[in-house]
Amino acid sequence: MRKKRKKQMEDIDLMEELEYYQPRKKRLEIPQKYVIAAVLILLAGAAFLFSPFFAVKNIRVENSERFATSDLCERIGLNQGDNAILFNRSKAEDILRQDPYIKDARLVWEFPDTMVISLTERKVRAYVPYMGSYLYIDEEGRVLDVQNVYTEGLPLVKGLVFSGFQRGEVLQVENQESLQVMLQISQMIQKYNLTEFAVEVDVSNTSDIYATVNQVQVHLGTMDNMDQKIRTMAAVVVTIPEEDRGTLDLSDLSKPIVFQYLL
């Protein structure tokens, strides 16, 4: 047993000696000229990257009716002379999308010196009174803005029940059906060019809807045939002098349409 163990130890010693005398692998040495060439290439690339060749000389805004070029550039920190490659376009897009009026924003670099800011804007479709002010609502029911005044050209909608709002978010109302009715009617009002008139719509009862155009109260009734009702209302009110007061019943279009004056 001892001889066997001794033989094993001798074998191990022999293997260690063999490993010791094995020629070691030579380290791969890169010629200095190649190292210098690589450094020079990197420096040249960096110099070209930061050169005026990639400087932004032109800034163009597309699909925007609301925002001026200078306003958008100030928000995202874009200036003429900025490096088009190094400018953080993704961050700029995120900043622009934070505005409630901007649904989407894209920055595109047109080689070699033009930066294009392309927007998809949200548009005001109606106004909703709230505690002495007015909420500006888009086609999705989103609150784009709140102001102390509103301009004619879009319907003023009454009858929505809500306790608060958040700018940039869809208005949370208790009577959700009334909100959907409001959105549909506001689109029809613009469709038939009633934006030239002072229009108010009461949607508190979606089964018995009323509108007021200038000084004419219009009974619209239910949402049945609402597109035709709004089209008829648009055709009739243009024939009524702005100072005239009266009522117009369009709740049942199968009946004769009669304008009744109020003295």
Image (cartoon, rainbow, N blue to C red):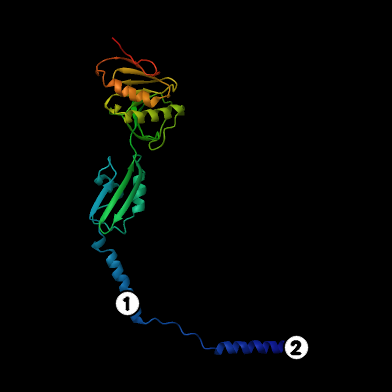
Residue lying at 35% horizontally and 79% vertically, measured from the top left: 34
**For the residues bearing labels 2 and 1, Cβ distance under 8 angstroms:** no
**Disc number at residue 37?**
1
Residue 198 x/y as whole percent: 29, 24
Rendered-image quadrant of the N terminus: bottom right
Q: Amino acid at mark 2?
A: Arg
Q: How many marks?
A: 2
70, 105: nearer the viewer:
105
Residue 107: where, in percent of width, then height? Answer: 32, 51
Q: Which residue is mark 2?
A: 2
Q: Callout 1 environment at 10 Å: few (<14), some (14 to 19), or many (20+)?
A: few
Where 214 falls versus 190 (above or below)? above
Q: Quadrant of the C terminus?
A: top left
Q: Where is residue 145? Give x, y as percent.
A: 34, 34
98 versus 152 height, above or below: below
Q: Which residue is rendered at x = 37% and y = 48% of the image?
A: 94
Residue at disc 1, secondary structure? helix
Instruction: Tell which residue pokes out farthest to the top in this image.
Output: 263
Query: Could you tell me the amino acid type at mark 1?
Result: Ala
- Residue in front for this viewpoint, 145 or 64: 64
Which quadrant of the view contains residue 227?
A: top left
* Label 2 or label 1, whichever comes before in sequence order: 2
